[in-house]
Amino acid sequence: MVAHIVDKYGNAIQEGDYVFTKIRGGSHEGKVQEIVTDEQRAEEKSVKHPPKVLLYNKDGRMVAHNSGTLEIRNGST
């Protein structure tokens, strides 16, 4: 069963969506690469407390966020 993962406005997040969140005076944004929903996959990706949304930030680093902190945006800015 696939978990229903939503952004902070209740919109369903899927791989390939462009998402945004403010963090520490800046922001993380990018295309969703993967949604980790189980402990085994979380361990493989070195992610704690799934579910997590994985994306590459502006610096090319993979970052993981709780879906409730994200909002879906159309395209890149």
Image (tube, rainbow, N blue to C red):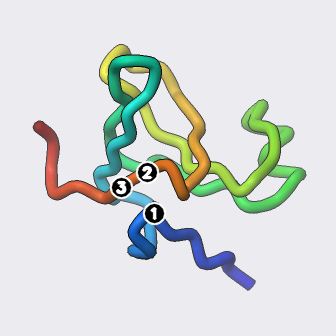
Say which quarter of the image contains residue 1. Answer: bottom right
The image shows residue 39 at horizontal and vertical percentages of 87, 53
Q: Are marks 1 and 2 in contact (CB under 8 Å)?
A: yes
Q: Which mark is residue 15?
A: none
Q: Are marks 3 and 1 in contact (CB under 8 Å)?
A: yes
The image shows residue 5 at horizontal and vertical percentages of 57, 70
In the rendered view, would you say 12 is above or below 72?
below
Q: Residues within 10 Å of mark 1 (few under 14, many from 20)?
A: some
* Near-viewer residue (39 or 26): 26
Give the alpha-carbon distance from disc 1 to disc 2, as whole Å. Answer: 5 Å
Q: Residue at x 60, y 49 (%)?
A: 66
**Residue position for label 1:** 7
Amino acid residing under circle 1: Asp
Q: Residue at x 15, y 50 (%)?
A: 75
Give the alpha-carbon distance from disc 3 to disc 1, as whole Å. Answer: 5 Å
**Residue position for label 2:** 70
Horizontal side of 40 relative to 57 (left or right) equals right
Horizontal side of 41 relative to 3 (left or right) equals right
The furthest residue to the bottom: 1
Quadrant in the picture for the C terminus: top left
3 or 1: tag closer to the N-terminus: 1
Q: Which mark is residue 71?
A: 3
The image shows residue 15 at horizontal and vertical percentages of 44, 60
Q: Residues within 10 Å of mark 2 (few under 14, many from 20)?
A: many
Q: Residues within 10 Å of mark 3 (few under 14, many from 20)?
A: many
Q: Residue at x 36, y 14 (%)?
A: 59
Per the image, label 1 sits on a secondary structure element best described as loop
In the rendered view, would you say 5 is above or below 29?
below
Per the image, label 3 sits on a secondary structure element best described as strand
Per the image, label 2 sits on a secondary structure element best described as loop
Say which quarter of the image contains residue 4. Answer: bottom right
